[in-house]
Amino acid sequence: MNPMNPRPRLQHVATLAEVSIAAASRILRGDTAEFSGPTCERVVKAAKQLGWRRNLLVHSLQTGRSRTVGVVVPPYDSFWVNLLSGVNSRLAAADFLPINVWPGDAENLPYFEAGEQESVQLMNRLLERWVDGLILWPPFAMTYHAHSRDLTDNTVPVVLIDYHAEHLGFDTVATDEFQGAALVAEHLLELGHRRFAFIGGRETAAQTWAQERRQGVEKAFSRVPGVSYKNWKLNSRGDDGLEVARRILRSSLQPTAIVAATDHQAVLAYQAAAELGLRIPEDLSVTGFADLDFAVGMIPPLTTVRQRAAEIGRQAASVILGRLDGTISSADPVDMRIPADLVVRSSTAPPRAAAASTARRKKTAGVPRT
Amino acid sequence: MNPMNPRPRLQHVATLAEVSIAAASRILRGDTAEFSGPTCERVVKAAKQLGWRRNLLVHSLQTGRSRTVGVVVPPYDSFWVNLLSGVNSRLAAADFLPINVWPGDAENLPYFEAGEQESVQLMNRLLERWVDGLILWPPFAMTYHAHSRDLTDNTVPVVLIDYHAEHLGFDTVATDEFQGAALVAEHLLELGHRRFAFIGGRETAAQTWAQERRQGVEKAFSRVPGVSYKNWKLNSRGDDGLEVARRILRSSLQPTAIVAATDHQAVLAYQAAAELGLRIPEDLSVTGFADLDFAVGMIPPLTTVRQRAAEIGRQAASVILGRLDGTISSADPVDMRIPADLVVRSSTAPPRAAAASTARRKKTAGVPRT
DNA sequence: CTGAAAGCGCTTACAG
DNA sequence: CTGAAAGCGCTTACAG
């Protein structure tokens, strides 16, 4: 491999086509009307021959826009990956490019508590590149928020994903967690379940989604008489999920259904159930939340709530773009909620006791009353 | 939210501090020695007060380097995500930033056959930003390669991930597939297995890893007498994996172990086994390849080969950096192979018949011959 | 100790 | 129809 060849300059093109730089510039940008046909041809041909392409850095310097958006969002699981996909495709359609980075080292994903130093450095690096907007993962935004005026000085539009906090004053796009949680709750109630365990996240300050899912479930349950319900949380490191799942199954509540705050925790419920010899869904129903890539491959395939990840990403990008071109100009932060969809697979079924009674009821209902 | 505030200019800082732009520039870059203490203080204070920060776009224009690397790699699963993590952290350490984009729409990950149009557009967008290097996913590189001289003109260093093809002339970093494959093969042989099925990918032109893993396994098997082995491939769309897994288990070969080319296919083997009432590992051993995030959560946890994803990413970034600073200057393309590690979990055990005989053998060996 | 001047690569009013 | 000139935001030899 030779030493790198230099990229061709407009100067070279102009010289080769025997015109001024200015002429070459205008012709290559499409202002061909003012020039003679042969001149245009010569320039276009020269550019092609040299492999010249426009230099967007120059354009950025001239317009003050880099056409670039900083996306500080770790691709933690398939929800986030699909979300990033949505961000990217919407940005690309507007001829913007994402710069996707995240704090934390390579071996240590997820990295919930970003070091302050590292966060500040990351953000500086982005801002030095004159990103035109910022899409942020809440824990990162919160860490950084305390350490710099950059986010509050309003030089750059900021959108937070999956987080609701009015006090920060940022635009927000998130799943409608309440609605999604109601979906699973009602599905299980309809199947006849009445004794539930909710296995939640840690509900840290940045995890408003965990609270909201729990509250959504609780609200649905509270409407139905005779429901027993208990909420279990993980420890502060979030690493005792399997132990918690075991405790749930051994508890005096004897839940017939476990509602997991995420698919990740549903996996733990499956494991604990397997250890105790409980079959899913015959002995225990389990639901997830997110519909991560592995959910459909679980045995049995997991009933869960699908978040519209790509749509959330697209909307987040749209909000940035809207702030940039003035389409969105409200003084109040945007608070966008995207609905979620129930995906019924094979991890839910009527509870043992109810199965018989449901069948009985159905039979009765099916018998003509005459 | 107010209309966006403009970013402060060096001009503003200089005016506020009552010095020339040139002086402000030098002081803020650290050339403080030449200036009086009070002058420096005034400038630094003014910059801080206005929230000024350097404009890297200018730096790029002046040096011809954007300190940016185009990373055209979809975060398809956790292997790729970890790889991207490695790329990012290595780039960040050198004060570079990744621009990670991929062809295909948001709803359609993975996107194996990128449309030509889209690929060319993506690459143009990157090159217009003057990326200093390119890390490419093989299918994308191959699609694009046919349509543009940009990759062969050698204006920008290119590294391919997980792909081996001398004819393209690009630097390559990949898992040592042969070595990794040998690891699982030998593990299963040691357990006493002799009848194997390999469920592979589609082995398209871009999937050299699928071929290499199969060859690695075959080589290990061929050394041991009495081994039966058969290779199954998926259809061209790669969507009949479950059906293939069923066929394997019903086949006359009656394999005691299934070697999957990736963890994804191991999941299908689990499903097929569950359908047929075969227990893992009692009735059937299964191995994966990659150690994706869900492997440890499978029931039972999957024995697999862990690819050093982050390390591959780091090395890929290092090769780009090396080409840029001249540390790497060989005319021949770099071909780096990163070893993989066997992770023994619970999906592998001695085959039923062999279990007894292995035990017997061991006992015999343990009895002193005297 | 500090400023005026040229320049990175290109675009765009402004002259001719 | 086409070119010379100023300018985007900053840096860096070069003068003083």
Image: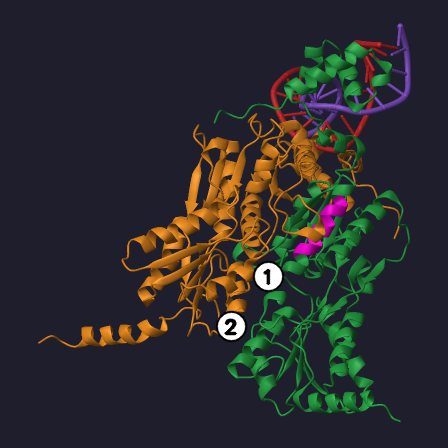
Chain colours: A green, B orange, C purple, D red
Mark 1 nearby-residue class (10 Å; few <14, some 14–19, many ≥20): some
Which residue sits at x=28%, y=57%?
B224
Instruction: Please state the horizontal and vertical placement of residue B37, each as a whole percent of the image.
Output: 66, 38
Q: Quadrant of residue A99?
A: top right
Q: Which residue is labeled 2 in the image?
A: B276
Q: Amino acid at mark 2?
A: Leu
| Front disc: 1 or 2 | 2
Q: Magenta segment: does it hold B297?
A: no
Residue ranking furthest to the left: B370
Which residue sits at x=44%, y=69%?
B347
- For label 1, the SS is loop
Tell me the chain of label 1. Answer: A
Q: Which residue is labeled 1 in the image?
A: A110
Is there CB contact under 8 Å for labels 1 and 2?
no
Tell me the chain of label 2. Answer: B
- For label 2, the SS is loop
Instruction: Please state the horizontal and vertical placement of residue A93, each as a whole percent of the image.
Output: 77, 42
Q: Is residue A239 left or right of residue B6?
A: left
Residue B129 - label: none
Q: Amino acid at mark 1?
A: Pro
Q: Magenta segment: does it hold A89?
A: yes
Front one among B197 and B71: B197
Q: Is residue B221 left or right of residue A98?
A: left
Asked if badge 1 and badge 2 are on a common chain, one would say no
Instruction: Please state the horizontal and vertical placement of residue A112, each as a whole percent of the image.
Output: 62, 63
Magenta segment range?
A81-91
